């Protein structure tokens, strides 16, 4: 093994090796000020013998995900123009390497594409994208014609129903992918153009025989703010009796630029099994609904996403089977922020759990591992330039309104939403005499609060124990 690139730069994959094995293409940030310019990632070619480095043509914005055609003459990748906004759709691009000519292959499709792969004959490029919470694989001809090959990918985070997944392409164009749904952990699926996908494995068949799982019912709710349609899903407890009223948990996704979908979520299944109706949704700011919908919260987060979520709660109650006096709320990361924001806005929830939340945007953007990104792309100004805007969007500004018993939870090695954020809410509620608790998970980072099965079980158990403390028994 020998080192090929040198210097104080950020080189990273995926790495695409030319068919003849003479060179590799990779992603790097090599401008003089690259640490403070996080979106300016470009593609480079390195000679595997001499180490000579060549920069490929690059526009404003990140170029990532390089994939070489079988003949080595063309390069597929994804790119978005940088407009200093919180979110941009990644577009599928193809470059002719001899000339550097680059064109958009995904055209005006208002979705974000990623993980491009070539067919064995070099006639098609495959890419993954998510549409209204459902992750799919599309095949593009070099003329830009798009055909959906597979859908229902899952498995990004089995504890919660996040959209995502992975896939690969065989020489004949068949697509193997992580195939799942709301009541099944992912298996390996196989899809071909024009044929129905089929499941190749059944890894948890014995488990499903001994468990009754909750189906996620899809509903579309008009937001009380502007009547925009908001996708939501409702899980009801096994053995649900429509003549009774059950307590309900609103579970909020993180990001905020992410999406839930009709996917398996082990923690939500545990909540349903414990006798709760569980509701989750994709409020404004969620991805997979196009550029405009995601950027409704650009420089405006949190805001009307609160109205979207309250509209979903109201719709779930209206459908029946929910006790409106027995409501609970929880979420992680961006969902933790919105949980803290919600209990500062309304006393309608009996208890809340804010996991790894942002509480004060000023302290967050200056201590987060994304400090070079967050202030620039989520606020447009530094905290000292517009402290009022930072305060206005911080849940700590609403701490004086909170009457809801609220538990906070964070990993001790979380550098995305540092423990000091959770501590601020805990301290504020302690000073105000509001019932509160704090759980700090030793050794856990932002993405690994429940990395081990034992941690996931403990997390769900702690949340249910907190809610059960305030849940009214003898449901109506």
Image: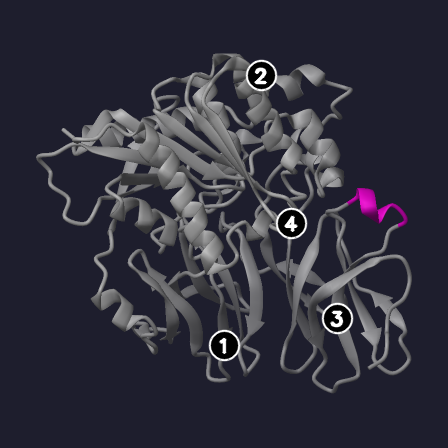
Is 253 magenta? The answer is no
Which quarter of the rendering shows the N terminus?
A: bottom right
Q: Which residue is mark 1?
A: 169
Residue occupying the point 75% across, 85% down: 21
Residues under labels 1 and 4: Cα distance?
24 Å
- Residues at circles 3 and 4 in contact by the CB criterion of under 8 Å: no
Which of the two discs, 3 and 2, labels the residue nearer the N terminus? 3
Residues under labels 3 and 2: Cα distance?
47 Å
Say which of 456 and 82 sits in front: 456
Q: Which residue is mark 2?
A: 397
Label 3 SS: strand
Residue occupying the point 48% across, 43% down: 290
Residues under labels 3 and 4: Cα distance?
19 Å
Q: Which residue is mark 4?
A: 80
Residue 162 seen in this snapshot: no
Q: Is residue 143 left or right of residue 280?
A: right
């Amino acid at each position: 093994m020998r080192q090929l690139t040198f210097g104080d730069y950020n080189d990273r994959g995926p790495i695409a090796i030319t068919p003849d094995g003479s060179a590799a293409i990779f992603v790097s940030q090599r401008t003089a000020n690259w640490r403070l310019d996080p979106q300016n990632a470009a593609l480079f070619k390195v000679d595997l013998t001499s180490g000579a480095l060549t920069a490929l043509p690059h526009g404003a914005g990140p170029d990532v995900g390089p994939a070489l055609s079988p003949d080595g003459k063309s390069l597929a990748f994804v790119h978005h123009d940088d407009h200093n906004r919180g979110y941009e759709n990644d577009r599928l691009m193809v470059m002719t390497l001899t000339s550097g000519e680059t064109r958009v292959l995904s055209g005006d499709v208002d979705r974000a594409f990623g993980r491009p792969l070539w067919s064995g004959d070099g006639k098609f490029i495959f890419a993954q994208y998510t549409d209204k919470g459902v992750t799919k694989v599309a095949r593009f001809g070099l003329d830009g014609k798009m055909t959906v090959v597979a859908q229902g990918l899952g498995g990004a985070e089995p504890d919660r129903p996040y959209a995502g997944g992975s896939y690969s392409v065989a020489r004949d164009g068949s697509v193997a992918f992580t195939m799942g749904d709301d009541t099944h952990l992912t298996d390996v699926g196989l899809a071909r153009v024009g044929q129905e996908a089929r499941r190749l494995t059944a890894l948890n068949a014995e488990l499903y025989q001994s468990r009754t799982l909750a189906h996620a019912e899809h509903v579309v709710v008009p937001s009380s703010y502007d009547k925009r349609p908001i996708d939501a899903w409702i899980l009801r407890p096994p053995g649900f009796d429509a003549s009774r009223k059950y307590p309900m948990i609103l579970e909020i996704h993180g990001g905020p630029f992410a999406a839930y979908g009709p996917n398996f979520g082990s923690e939500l299944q545990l909540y349903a099994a414990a006798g709760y109706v569980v509701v989750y949704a994709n409020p404004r700011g969620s991805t997979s609904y196009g550029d405009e919908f995601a950027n409704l919260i650009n420089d405006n987060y949190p805001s009307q996403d609160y109205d979207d979520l309250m509209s979903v709660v109201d719709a779930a109650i209206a459908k029946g089977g929910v006790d409106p006096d027995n409501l609970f709320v929880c979420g992680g990361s961006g969902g933790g922020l919105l949980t803290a924001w919600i209990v500062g806005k309304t006393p309608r929830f009996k208890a809340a759990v804010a996991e790894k939340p942002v509480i004060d945007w000023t302290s967050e953007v200056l201590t987060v591992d994304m400090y070079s990104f967050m202030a620039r792309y989520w606020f447009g100004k530094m905290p000292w330039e517009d402290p009022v805007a930072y305060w206005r969007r911080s849940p700590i500004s609403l701490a004086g309104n909170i009457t809801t018993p609220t538990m906070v939870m964070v990993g001790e090695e979380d550098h995305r939403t540092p423990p000091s954020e959770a501590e601020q809410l805990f301290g504020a509620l302690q000073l105000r005499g509001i019932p509160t608790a704090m759980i700090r998970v030793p050794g856990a980072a932002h993405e690994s609060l429940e990395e081990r099965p034992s941690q996931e079980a403990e997390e769900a158990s702690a949340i249910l124990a907190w809610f059960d403390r305030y849940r009214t028994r003898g449901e109506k």
